[in-house]
Image (cartoon, coloured by chain):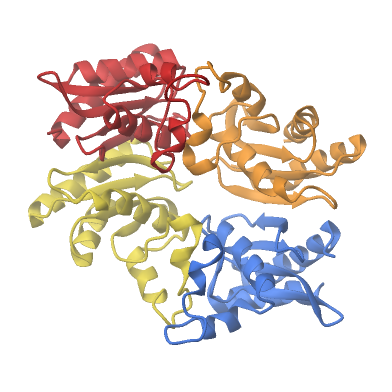
Chain colours: A blue, B orange, C red, D yellow
Amino acid sequence: MVTLNDARRVIDAAEKKAQEIGQPMNIAVADAGGNLVAHIRMDEAWIGSIDISIKKAFTARAFDITTEDLATQSQPGGQFFGIHASNDGRIMIFAGGVPLKLDGKVIGAVGVSGGSGVQDHAVAMAGAEAF
Amino acid sequence: MVTLNDARRVIDAAEKKAQEIGQPMNIAVADAGGNLVAHIRMDEAWIGSIDISIKKAFTARAFDITTEDLATQSQPGGQFFGIHASNDGRIMIFAGGVPLKLDGKVIGAVGVSGGSGVQDHAVAMAGAEAF
Amino acid sequence: MVTLNDARRVIDAAEKKAQEIGQPMNIAVADAGGNLVAHIRMDEAWIGSIDISIKKAFTARAFDITTEDLATQSQPGGQFFGIHASNDGRIMIFAGGVPLKLDGKVIGAVGVSGGSGVQDHAVAMAGAEAF
Amino acid sequence: MVTLNDARRVIDAAEKKAQEIGQPMNIAVADAGGNLVAHIRMDEAWIGSIDISIKKAFTARAFDITTEDLATQSQPGGQFFGIHASNDGRIMIFAGGVPLKLDGKVIGAVGVSGGSGVQDHAVAMAGAEAF
């Protein structure tokens, strides 16, 4: 189970990482059901990334995979190309979504959006490690 | 402008109120553009209320009105009956959304969902007063 | 045919009327196909009314009727109750949409949103009369 | 803040540019929240471009980037491939959306649609320069 306290710990760690790299981010945490537990938009972060951060968290839990890895398999010719058209547009196929694991089992996810794919993934990883 | 710090202050006050009345809630804060700044779902709060809290915040800013007041005018026969069909399903017409004002001007809103209409409105008001 | 010049003349007249009554409005003009020709949001007008003004214009042309009249027939028990669920959510059933006529034939419409139903209708009528 | 006067100045400049190159356009201006301030469709411009112009303006503000630049990064293999599935279909990833800046900060955007990507971008740039 991902409690609100858990989500806040993940968000705090991710926010700290975002501050270190100097890029304001949207950070979202989803639970085992893929449903949002908490979200923050740092000052000056892109408004288009609100939705993306929430959907990256959903996606990472929906398929128990980082969206960075899913991206590889969702390119034209890849085995999951077209997956972004499923789930009523809730699937994001670029880096920034990372599963949250407990004893090796995925029980939630964190989604980050606001910078480059490399930055988003790094901030999400910092959040996941704090879980 | 509604900063992340502002949003957290509003959410903290609303969360405290929700704890006092013993009803777990979803609490969301939107800025002047109606865009989400932050959201929390308290442990055990309804997952169906995630979306509602975010949309109540949007609605309260979209029309600079509490959703409790909008509800009155959106009933059958009311001057705004049918408004819930606008804005691509983002309009909530029951209590729980309250504008955030600075010097008498609306610059954001808080949306709460998780209990009765009376409870949602009371929690949102507690949040708005902390702004 | 509703040209851009026609739409601007309608909008100017409606904007002037809105200024007279002291209520900032969203004003939209649609052509014979129900498609948007022009839209303005006056400073401080509700952001939730952008969509509503555009949809009121569509609705007034879609059924060649004022949305004030349509409202009467779309209440519970009325012959068109439920019509707001049609056309992918583009139907507005409260006052503020008025057809634009040429030689007795509807060839477009104006939609206004930003105040009470009475205000919205008055501003839309001012626009329609300038057509 | 993007006032209606600002939006009209941007639209006038863009419209003039469109007339110079002889291609009728849809031109839209959004504010800091990504919400529409004004829109025009020049006579004979494509009706399918109404929506696109409004969404290009939203997109350019949502990510503080021209949609021409976003296009480059949203191709298969790019770091943002799949971003067009976010924000409920409001993201346009081809040229014609340009941020409006004040003192180096993005506070709105202009979106243009009606011709080739090169034409759309040129008309949007003419609008942005008038801001």
Q: Residue at x 81, y 31 (%)?
A: B119
Q: Is residue D50 left or right of residue B62?
A: left
**Could you say which quadrant of the image residue D120 lies in?**
bottom left
Q: Is residue A34 left or right of residue B31?
A: right
* Residue A123 can be seen, yes or no: no
**Could you say which quadrant of the image residue A105 lies in?**
bottom right
Image location (x, y in percent) of residue B82: 50, 28
In this picture, is A119 found above or below B118? below
| Number of callouts | 0
Image location (x, y in percent) of residue B46: 77, 47
Q: Residue at x 36, y 25 (%)?
A: C112
Q: Is residue C111 left or right of residue B24?
A: left
Q: Nearer the viewer, residue A102 or D19?
A: A102
**Could you say which quadrant of the image residue D38 lies in?**
top left
Q: Quadrant of the N terminus of chain A?
A: bottom right
In this picture, is D98 found above or below B121? below
Q: Is residue D92 left or right of residue A69?
A: left
* Residue A18 can be seen, yes or no: yes
Image location (x, y in percent) of residue A54: 63, 61
Image location (x, y in percent) of residue B7: 70, 45
Q: Nearer the viewer, residue C89 or A5?
A: C89
Q: Quadrant of the C terminus of chain A?
A: bottom right
Q: Residue at x 72, y 39 (%)?
A: B112
